[in-house]
Each structure stands twice: as C-alpha cells, then as structure tokens.
Image (cartoon, helix red, strand yellow):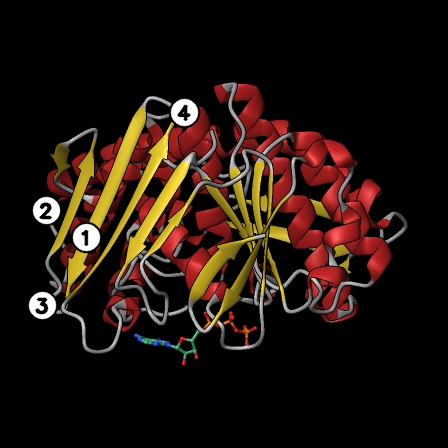
Amino acid sequence: MAIELLMLQGVRNLSPTNVSPSPLVNLIYGENGSGKTSFLEAIYYLAYCKSFRTHKQKNLIQHGQNTMTGFCQLPHKQLGVERNQEGQRRIKLNGVCLNSAAELASVLPIQLLDPTMFRLLEGSPQLRREYIDWGVFHVEPQFFGIWKQFKRAHQTRNALLRAGGASESERKIWHSSLSDLANQITSMRIAYLERLKPLFDHYMARLNDGLGVTMSFYQGWKKDQDYYELLESSWKSDIESGYTKSGPQRADLRIKAENVPAMDVLSRGQQKMVVCALKLAQADLYKQVSGSPCIFLVDDLAAELDINHRKALCRLLEELKCQVFVTAVESTQIQGCWSPSSQLKTFHVEHGTINQE
Ligand SMILES: Nc1ncnc2c1ncn2[C@@H]1O[C@H](COP(=O)(O)OP(=O)(O)OP(=O)(O)O)[C@@H](O)[C@H]1O
C-alpha cells in the first residue's frame, strides 16, 4: 500500500498541498514550526479521522478557515475526508460516503513513530490493548464485531452491578454470553501475539541486542481460571465495586528488560527502540497476512536516536519495502541513512509550503 497522490487544504499552517510521494522513502525537512508534523498529522487523519497529537480535531483546521480536506490516491482506491468547524465530517471511499470512521480501519494501514512513542510502554494498558487489537483486527477481521458485542455485554453487566444485581437466571445468561465472547477475544489475542513474538525478538535483536527485552501477555484475569466461574464468584464483590474487575477489558502487554518493567530501567532512547521493534513486528506480520506493507509516519527521527540506531531503523524500514514519510529539521540528519534503492524523494517545508527538491 502506498499513497500515490496526496492533496490537502485548510490543514493547520499548510498551504494547499499537492504531492506525489515516492512509493518508498519520503524525507520532509524544514525549520521548527514549518509544518512537518502537520503534514504527517494530515495523513494520519485520512487513515483514522483523528489526530495523533490532540483530542480536539477542530485544532487541525487552519485558523480563519471553515473546512479542511484531505484526499489521497491509493492503488485502485480514492479516499477523501472533510471536516468543518461545526464538527461535521464526510468520508468518501471511491466516491461513496462512509457512515463511520471505523469503516476506514483497513483502507490505510498506518504505523506511527513519533517523539512520544515511549508512552506505549509507560502509558496506560489501554494503549497497549489498542496496539494488540490493531494487529488482531488486521489478521482476524471478525475481531472487531466480537469486541463490540463484548463491550455491550460488559456495559450491561456493569449497569446491573450498579443497579444492585439481577435475577439468577438473568445473571447466568449474561455471564455465559460474556465469557463466550471474552474467551474468543482472548484466544485471538493470544494467537496473534504468538505470531508476533518471534518477529518482535528479531527486530529487537537488529535494533538493540543485549537489552534482554521480553514480552508477555496478561489476559485480564488468571490464566488457568475459567472466566464464567470467575464472573459468577466475583458477582458480590463486583456489586460492591460497581464494575467488572476482571476480563479482556483489563488485558495488557507486559514488556520487561531483564525481568524488570522496561520503563523502569531503559533509557528514553532504548524505550523508543523497543517501541520501534513492536511497530516493525506488527507491520511485518501485517504484510505477511495482507500481502501489502503498512505506511510508516516517522516524526523527528533524530530525536533521541543516535546515528547508528537511526541507520539501523532506516535499514529495517527499507527491508520492509514500505512507504515511509520521515521528518527532520535538517535533511542531513537522515538523508545519508538510506540506500540508493530507497527511491528517496526529498521535500522542503517552509512556512507551510511543501516543495519537492
Ligand atoms: N489551526 C492552525 N492554523 C494555522 N496554523 C497552525 C494551526 N495549528 C498550528 N499551527 C501552526 O502550524 C505550525 C506548524 O506546526 P508543526 O508542528 O507542523 O511544525 P513542525 O515543522 O513539525 O515543527 P517542529 O520541528 O518544531 O516539530 C506552527 O507554527 C503552529 O503554530
């Protein structure tokens, strides 16, 4: 998958933009505040209808404008997204309006590496669940529907808990349905991670061998415990808490270095390497399953990565043969990291205007 043409209008400080990127490596460089991250943010918005740096999507719309629009030409697909100040949004795929951003999930598979990526290790388990589930969904598309059903059943159980209980028969019906869905979700997550783990080990070794980094999966309750039995036995204590304390909604990916949580012992740069290995492994598996590579958005590659690690990451991105959009303040920071086969295109951003060199 590669973007063949990208058109943007009304995005942050960017002038109307019309770019034909390289199918492989695109280097976007310019001074601080010139618009590099905004450019990546616009691509990300096309894929997910949300920003990676703010919850307020309105902030993406250029000051003084009512609307922002993004359009990209993909192989055999055209994707357009528009959003206005009132929060109204229009998504079109091949000229047909989509009802929700969720329908976009498999159109533009994007992996983001940015200066805050270490949060995947430090942040809440929710971020790591989202990471796992992105991959599970792309391997098992029915996962999304099962997860939605589970979420509804889980919300209903919580509502019953807060209401002080339910009849035995009603409770048992919900527990049976919840445990069935929870077990399906967990099996899919475990199967996905079993395929991901050797890839993660491979990329970890290529990026920073010797850190002793391991990943393990916590499914959200004790491994050997039957989830239906657990729901039944924890009913009373869950009524006291007012919510369901265990289940796939509490799952986590535990990353350790020499048996200690990675975030407690690794440097920022080393944590970033671990996150790079996680994302590369995910992109590799995605490519094996779908036959097509992800697109990588790499913001400010030079931040906290020394030249050897930068080169190692660039080599791995090249080997994946994926389309990459990478930003830097100075082109010299990363221009030399790519081989001649990377079909490098360089774009200079100046006061929001993007020019190919
Ligand atoms: N809605 C908006 N309308 C117009 N300009 C905006 C809007 N939001 C942000 N800006 C401005 O856009 C500029 C571009 O910011 P951006 O983060 O893309 O720069 P950058 O090139 O990535 O910088 P850095 O190298 O410092 O990360 C900033 O000067 C910012 O103040």
Q: How many marks?
A: 4
Q: Amino acid at mark 2?
A: Ser
Instruction: Left or right? Give the position of 193 relative to 85.
Output: right
- Residue 275 position, x and y percent, is 65, 53
The residue under label 1 is 82
Q: CA distance from mark 1 to mark 3?
A: 12 Å
Between discs 4 and 3, the one toward the N terminus: 3
Q: Secondary structure at mark 1?
A: strand
**Rendering coords of residue 128 (x, y %):** 51, 52
Left or right of 3? Residue 90 is left
Mark 1 or 3, closer to the camera: 1
Instruction: Give how far across and how far down residue 197 sits, in percent.
Output: 67, 34
| Label 1 CA crowd tier, 10 Å (few <14, some 14–19, many 20+) | many
**Earlier sequence position, callout 2 versus callout 1:** 1
Q: Quadrant of residue 211?
A: bottom right
Residue 216 visible here: no
Q: Which residue lies under the disc numbered 2? A: 167
For mark 4, give the secondary structure: loop
Nearer the camera: disc 4 or disc 2: 4
Q: Identify the secondary structure beneath mark 3.
A: loop
Decide if ligand 1 comes within 8 Å of the CB at mark 2.
no
Residue 140's tag is 4
Q: Which residue is label 3 attached to? A: 86
User: Is there CB contact under 8 Å for labels 2 and 3?
Assistant: no
What residue appears at the point 69 percent right and 61 percent down from the top-left corner? 331
Residue at x-position 26% and y-position 64%: 10
Sequence-earlier tag: 2 or 3: 3
Q: Amino acid at mark 1?
A: Glu
In the image: residue 331, left or right of residue 20: right
**Can residue 304 be spotted in the picture?**
yes
Mark 2, secondary structure of its residue: loop
